[in-house]
Image (spheres, helix red, strand yellow):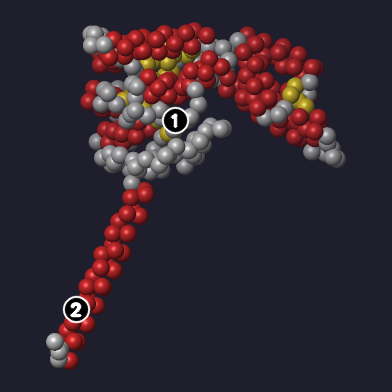
Amino acid sequence: MKFTSKQVTTIIVSVAAVFITMAVFTFVVGEDDDSTGDSNTEAVSPSDKPAAPADGATAGPVVAPVEEPAAKQLDSTDYLAVKKEVESDPYKELDELIGLKEVKDEVHDLVNFVKVQKMREEQGLKVPKMSYHLVFTGSPGTGKTTVARIVARIYKDLGVLEKGHTVETDRSGLVAEYVGQTAVKTNAIIDSALNGVLFIDEAYALVPEHAGSDYGQEAISTLLKRMEDDRDRLVVIIAGYTNEMKRFINSNPGLQSRFNKYINFPDYSADELFRIYELHAKKNQYQLNAEAGEYLRERLEYVVAHKDRNFGNGRYSRNLFEKSIQSQANRLSGVSNPTSEMLSEITKEDIEKALANTK
């Protein structure tokens, strides 16, 4: 069969058009596949990077993420810290915390209750309706945030929550400056905490003691509604001073009905503060000499005996350690070729200068 030159030209043009169409289609599909890589990026504050895997942890198989409705994008002024789950034993971490015996006992009691209710449910027995939301009361620096992160991971292990992450915020992360914006801001924070724990520090600030009309009430109303609507995907832990938290809970019947489990965090003793200081030193390869250790114990006894309600507890020990090694650095800056022993030793002089600059 013979073709005319006109027919040959038509065939060539048609084939070329097919190849061009296929190439364009392949390019477009390739672009769409690449764009999905950012569809599940978690919001974190600029100063808070995602937690690295624990030592010895190995990466698991790559699993395609399940897409969820996109939440409102948080802007840079929102206070939001997301603590991802880590691959370590939360029960062991809880037990290894310095002090806090009563707190540990309370958490273990809660764990035992949840475990038994899960067993009853599996065997078709009735399970009483229970709330997993918690109220942590106590002074600053007593470990409330640390325990909240541990509880989130325990809830994941028990099957209460799908994830083990914690979203930490306070009044500034929930309440906006203008009418109508607080609900939007609060919902955005809650969306980021779904399937995990929302930890609200100094929650009593949402209801100022001597304030009249305040946007904090709008945040509370939004929170209570979401706690009901998302009761299987959200656990809320609120924290603050004991008396202020009682006033806060009593200010709203909805809060009273949803928060009925209280855990009190006692102040640290002087001995516990000393052990916390030693723990920071050991982790960073420092050690107190005998004179410095004896002096630090004496001073911590005095500090605890004369503390006020704003005393930082564990935070005080950490700050004192940081000031101590700064003092040591200043002391050694003029020494030529200091030995490793000198670079590791914290002296009484270092402690004295650190105490003068620690609040």
* x then y, percent, for residue 153: 43, 24
Residue 98 appears anywhere in the view? yes
* x then y, percent, for residue 133: 34, 17
Assign a secondary structure to mark 2.
helix
* Numbered label attached to residue 215: none
Q: Which of the 4 image quadrants contains residue 191?
A: top left
Q: Give the quarter of the figure containing the C terminus.
A: top right
Task: Work out how far the residue at label 2 is from the one at label 1, CA to CA, in angstroms.
Answer: 57 Å
* Nearer-the-camera pick, 133 or 85: 85
Describe residue 319's horizontal placement relative to residue 353 as left or right: left
Describe residue 136's horizontal placement relative to residue 310 as left or right: left
Describe residue 225's horizontal placement relative to residue 294 as left or right: left
Q: Is residue 132 above or below residue 47?
A: above
Q: Residue at x 77, y 27 (%)?
A: 345
Q: Is residue 5 above or below residue 108?
A: below
Query: Going by the picture, which residue comes out furthest to the right?
Result: 336
Q: Residue at x 56, y 32 (%)?
A: 56
Q: Residue at x 39, y 10 (%)?
A: 112
Q: What amino acid is labelled 1 in the image?
A: Glu
Q: Is residue 72 above or below residue 92?
A: below
Query: Going by the picture, which residue comes out furthest to the bottom?
Result: 5
Assign a secondary structure to mark 1.
loop
Residue highlighted by disc 1: 85
Residue highlighted by disc 2: 14
Q: Which of the 4 image quadrants contains residue 132?
A: top left
Characterize the local packing of mark 2: few (<14), some (14-19) or many (20 or more) Cα atoms within 10 angstroms: few
Residue 207 appears anywhere in the view? no
Q: Give the quarter of the figure containing the N terminus.
A: bottom left
Q: Residue at x 37, y 16 (%)?
A: 134
Which is in the foreground here, disc 2 or disc 1? 2
